[in-house]
Amino acid sequence: MNAPLKNDRLEWLQGPAAASDHSPKCSAVPKERTNPWRLVLLGSPGVGKGTQAELLTERLGACHLSTGDVFRAAGKTPDCDKSAAMKAALEFMRRGELVPDSTVWDMVRERSRCILNCGGFILDGFPRTLAQAESLRKLMEEGKLSLSAVINYELPVNEIVQRLSGRRTCEKCKSVFNVKERPPKVEAVCDHCAGRLLQREDDLPEAITVRLEAYERLTAPLINFYESLGLLMPIAARGTPDEILARTLEKMNAVTAEHV
Ligand code: ADP
């Protein structure tokens, strides 16, 4: 059976350049829903957020909005097309450090149509600091929207390191595999689009340590922030991607039966 058509997320990945008139340019636009899911995914790097975001996207029909994917897509454009802020952002990323809040927010704000869309979204990798969470809150308040839930994927550090070092990403469609836990059918070839599977530069050992430290210091405080707003949904990130998805959907179902 052929895989369903994947949304190329052009408007999110390329920003205003892809949406110069008022019609969205993505290959698949989410259906308008009365009560769409608007989710934030939290969890340490390597916990499997990207994989779960893809599975949830297929299941819920919302847009997968990953800030890391935007930076990686920008990294592939010719140097002369990159702004100074983007060049600097890519250096932070290569070292495994967080990109400054102002750069991230400029990038997200110019893609606000993706967040304000009527089919919902799954934010993956944003917000990553309390300042970013506050910017998101204001944007959503202006659009009279609220988050449905914040899913926090939990996993012990030793398993996280194993996942990060085994991760391989498709250079074309960005699907994520793991050489141990979720291998592709053919080695180094994407199951969905036959693109080459590559190891991310920031999945090399030195960068992994920096990323885990940045997570503990700057992103982990968001857990308490969203818990105090009554939005936090902790999920054990153990097992296969499908098991984790089932656990997530079960919890979401318990929150409200009408969404799924
Ligand atoms: P991870 O697997 O580490 O969660 P991501 O794909 O979400 O990876 O992000 C990769 C890198 O992009 C981060 O390490 C960071 O340098 C940069 N980045 C992505 N999103 C943000 C953000 N919201 N704030 C700051 N930096 C970010």
Image: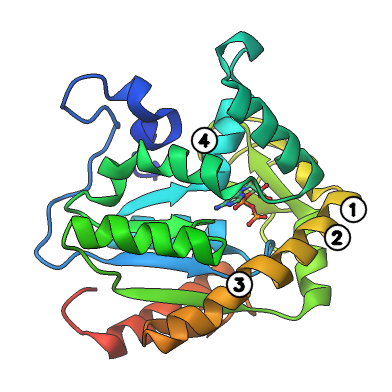
Cβ–Cβ under 8 Å for marks 4 and 2: no
Q: Can you say whether 158 is above or below 129 in the image?
A: below
Q: Residues within 10 Å of mark 2 (few under 14, many from 20)?
A: some
- Spatial CA distance of label 3 from label 1 is 24 Å
Question: Which mark lies nearer to you, 3 or 2?
Answer: 2
Amino acid tagged 2: Thr
Amino acid tagged 4: Cys
Q: Is any atom of residue 179 visible in this view? A: no
Cβ–Cβ under 8 Å for marks 1 and 2: yes
Which quadrant does the N terminus fall into?
Answer: top left
Residue located beneath label 3 in the image? 240
Q: Can you say whether 254 is above or below 118 in the image?
A: below
In the image: residue 149, left or right of residue 219:
left
Q: Earlier in the sequence, mark 4 or mark 2?
A: 4
Disc assigned to residue 209: 2
Percent x, y for residue 158? 84, 75
Cβ–Cβ under 8 Å for marks 3 and 1: no
Percent x, y for residue 56? 39, 63
